[in-house]
Image (tube, rainbow, N blue to C red):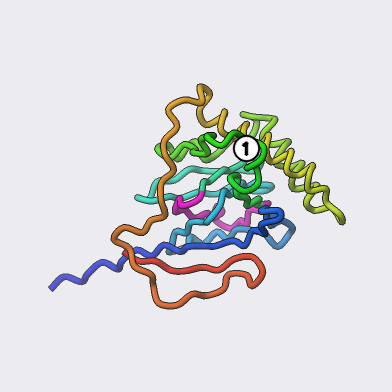
Amino acid sequence: MPTKKPKPIVEYRNYYLPSSFPVLLLTGDNWKISDVRSEHLHFHNCLEVGICHTDSGTLEFCSAMTIPFSAGDVTCIPRNIPHTTYSARYTKSRWSYLFFDPRLLFRDMLPPDFNYSMIYDDIHKYLIPAGSSRRIALLAEAAVEELSAMNPDHMLVRSYLFVLYMEIIRFQNPKTQNMQPEIPPPRKNFRTYPGIHSISPRHSISSRITT
């Protein structure tokens, strides 16, 4: 009797974003990505913007679809998109990550009927290659630098992130037309895997989901 193929597991990472300022920065020398590919994809409860500072590697999505990345690239992965990141062999790429919820952060800056949807049918839109948009790279770096300050100016950070968000939408779809509805979390035909464990006590929790 043939052995059943193990069921794939997807981890849900819920990042805590304070309602007063729904932004989280992860940066520093400790934020390096291993060259070991994770067995599990994961998805977030918010938008993830990443800046690759060193080396190279691979972004992997569902159905084993992959995108190579290298130093200077910026990634923008919407919430509910399963993915994983790993560095090239024998390297550990260093990253900075900005997690934020545009609906909460920009709710008084955009009209009520604004379409917050991003591109979901082309994974290549999730990576902005180095040199392809100088403004996106500068805005992301500016937000990281300000948030890393001793006393960051939240109004200034929100301004950076607002323009960054709009630039990403324009990069994904220059015509800003035919935006697709946001996909829901991968729940259909999924069940929660036993146990919730802590990824970082202050920043996120992770649930395992399996088909």
Q: Furthest-right residue in view?
A: 150
Q: Is 84 a magenta residue? A: yes
Q: Where is 192 relative to 22, above or below?
A: below
Residue 194 rendering spot, x and y as whole percentages:
40, 77
Residue 158 rendering spot, x and y as whole percentages:
73, 43
Q: Is 49 a magenta residue? A: no
- Which residue is at 61% across, 46% downward? 49
Q: Where is 76 relative to 18, above or below?
A: above
Q: Which residues are magenta?
A: 79-96
Is residue 189 found left or right of 198 in the rendered image?
A: left
Judging by the rendered image, the residue that carries numbered circle 1 is: 165
- Which residue is at 62% across, 33% downward? 166
Camera-side residue: 141 or 202?
202
The secondary structure type at the circle numbered 1 is helix
Camera-side residue: 86 or 89?
86
- Which residue is at 50% across, 49% downward? 59
